[in-house]
């Protein structure tokens, strides 16, 4: 059914109200003010939903959103400006431009693992680009969903931006409607459902999915530094991060020293009893807790392994030795289990990496320049880091997105604006001259036409 809200948003967009720079800036400022006003409520909600500490919640949920808004406020005027492009001599006299144009009525689905950040970050791009927006928060993070609804109601006219709450049945109803752009963050399985639904209306989509993101470590790096950065990236949010290292691929001769370094790093971060650490999150619900518990082979546990079902707590857990055939290597883990596999040669490592679809992220710890270049040239992935984890997501200048099974399209910074904009190409020609050779009857010999078109392809 076509709801009254959708009809109102369509009318609001067609009125042209969202197109001016002044309107877009005002809306972004309104959103920034609402987020800052409700900051404590957001922190409390994330604590209730995922046991996130205030520091973790602020640094990974609120701060990235406010940074996106401020970045858009600074650069939006330049992003909106038509961009002049070279014009083939053949079309002289003429001017070519690319004009960014809002899609219209857009739909954003947010996930539960970063339920605030991953809703508002794409929303900033949609608003900056001049669209009307329906957002669907995740019902699996109900406290964050509730505060999100308050922020949106305070910041926006629902004819411009509105939220629709509910479970999968509501998402299914939304997907039956015609939108001009859909942005989805979640699992590859649900991403396929979204893509099939979008195909019914030929709606363009951005899919931010996941996959088994590898982390390769060779013997050239200081293991204490590598271990800290790997443990931080893996066990942040209890491993419930789409770009977390999913498994380690370690040069065999450093496996045991690296495991010891990881144990030390985890002890430094979360203490000897991580369940008592205020900085260690919990699993989102019982279903995911049971799934993760089922992937944990007690015979492979070399650190951690403790669980508390009543708290949905799973300790930071290292698994070794692990083979590609083990259950934990058959699906994206999305939790605090870190399988450790080994390799002897680079060719062996590359062969194992080729077993898995293109990941959203790839991390490699090495000081070997030749190996770095080989990995960059041969491993297909969405984005990543050398000698660190996660930080590629924090740069406004880098597009964030996957490829293949890990997604399509990208966002962040200007790339968010582009994700929600159609790039309209226009050539503006003068009327004071009109060459006759382009019109029938054609009298120019073919040999001269070839030369003419070759010269005409030069750009002014």
Image (cartoon, grey):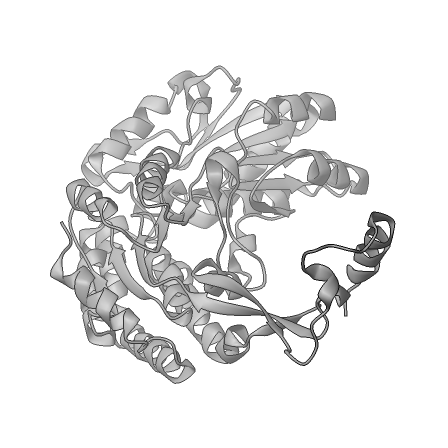
**Which residue occupies 16% across, 41% down?**
169
Residue lying at the far bottom in this picture: please name it.
Answer: 22
In this view of the protein, which residue sits in the foreground, 278 or 157? Answer: 157
Q: Is residue 272 left or right of residue 384?
A: left
Q: Is residue 313 left or right of residue 360?
A: left
Q: Position of residue 280 (x, y in %)?
A: 35, 48
Q: In the displayed structure, would residue 428 be above or below residue 357?
A: below
Q: In the displayed structure, would residue 419 be above or below residue 73?
A: above
In this view of the protein, which residue sits in the foreground, 194 or 349? Answer: 194
* Total numbered badges shown on the rendered structure: 0
Q: Residue 216's image quarter?
A: top right
**Which residue occupies 64% across, 78% down?**
430
Q: Position of residue 299 (x, y in %)?
A: 42, 16
Q: In the rendered view of the protein, which quadrant contains the C terminus?
A: bottom right
**Which residue occupies 56% across, 22% down?**
355
**Which residue occupies 77% across, 59% down?**
457
In this view of the protein, which residue sits in the foreground, 71 or 441? Answer: 441
Q: In the displayed structure, would residue 297 be above or below residue 364?
A: above
Q: Position of residue 123 (x, y in %)?
A: 35, 63
Please say whether residue 127 is visible from this viewpoint: yes
Q: Is residue 146 left or right of residue 250?
A: left
Q: In the displayed structure, would residue 374 be above or below residue 345?
A: below
Please say whether residue 55 is visible from this viewpoint: no
Q: Position of residue 209 (x, y in %)?
A: 42, 41
In this view of the protein, which residue sits in the foreground, 10 or 291? Answer: 10
Q: Is residue 273 left or right of residue 391?
A: left
Q: Residue 63's image quarter?
A: bottom left
């Amino acid at each position: 059914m076509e709801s009254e809200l959708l009809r109102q948003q369509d009318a609001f967009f067609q009125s042209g109200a969202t197109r001016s720079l002044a309107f877009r800036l005002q809306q972004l400022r309104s959103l920034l003010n609402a987020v800052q006003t409700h900051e404590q409520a957001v922190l409390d909600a994330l604590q209730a939903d995922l046991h996130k500490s205030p520091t973790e919640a602020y640094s990974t949920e609120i701060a990235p959103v406010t940074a996106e808004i401020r970045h858009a406020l600074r650069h939006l005027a330049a992003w909106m400006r038509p961009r002049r492009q070279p014009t083939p001599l053949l079309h002289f006299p003429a001017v070519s431009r690319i004009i960014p144009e809002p899609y219209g009525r857009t739909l954003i689905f947010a996930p539960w693992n970063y339920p605030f950040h991953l809703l508002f970050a794409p929303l900033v791009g949609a608003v900056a680009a001049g669209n009307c927006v329906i957002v669907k928060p995740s019902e699996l993070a109900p406290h964050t969903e509730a505060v999100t609804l308050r922020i949106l109601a305070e910041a926006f006219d629902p004819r411009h931006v509105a939220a629709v709450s509910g479970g999968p049945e509501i998402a299914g109803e939304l997907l039956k409607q015609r939108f001009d752009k859909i942005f989805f963050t979640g699992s590859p399985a649900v991403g396929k459902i979204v893509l099939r639904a979008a195909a019914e209306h030929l709606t363009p989509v951005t899919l931010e999915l996941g996959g088994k993101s590898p982390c390769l470590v060779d013997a050239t790096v200081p293991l204490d530094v590598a271990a800290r950065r790997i443990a931080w990236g893996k066990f942040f949010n209890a491993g419930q991060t789409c770009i977390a290292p999913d498994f380690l691929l370690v040069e065999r001769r450093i496996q045991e020293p690296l495991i010891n370094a990881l144990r030390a790093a985890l002890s430094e971060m979360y203490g000897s009893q991580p369940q008592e650490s205020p900085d260690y999150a919990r699993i989102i619900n019982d279903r995911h807790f049971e799934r993760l518990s089922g992937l944990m082979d007690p015979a492979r546990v070399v650190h951690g392994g403790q669980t508390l079902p009543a708290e949905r707590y799973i300790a930071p857990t290292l698994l070794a030795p692990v083979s590609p055939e083990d259950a934990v290597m058959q699906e994206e883990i999305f939790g605090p289990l870190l399988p450790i596999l080994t390799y002897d040669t680079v060719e062996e490592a590359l062969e194992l990496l080729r077993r898995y679809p293109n990941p959203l992220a790839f991390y490699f710890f090495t000081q070997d320049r030749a190996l770095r270049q080989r990995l960059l040239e041969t491993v297909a992935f969405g984005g990543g880091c050398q000698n660190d984890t996660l930080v590629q997501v924090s740069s406004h200048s880098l597009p964030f997105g996957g490829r293949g099974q890990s997604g399509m399209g990208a966002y962040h910074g200007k790339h968010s604006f582009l994700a929600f904009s159609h790039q309209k190409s226009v050539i503006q020609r003068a009327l004071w001259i009109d060459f006759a050779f382009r019109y029938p009857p054609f009298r120019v010999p073919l040999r001269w036409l070839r030369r003419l078109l070759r010269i005409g392809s030069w750009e002014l």
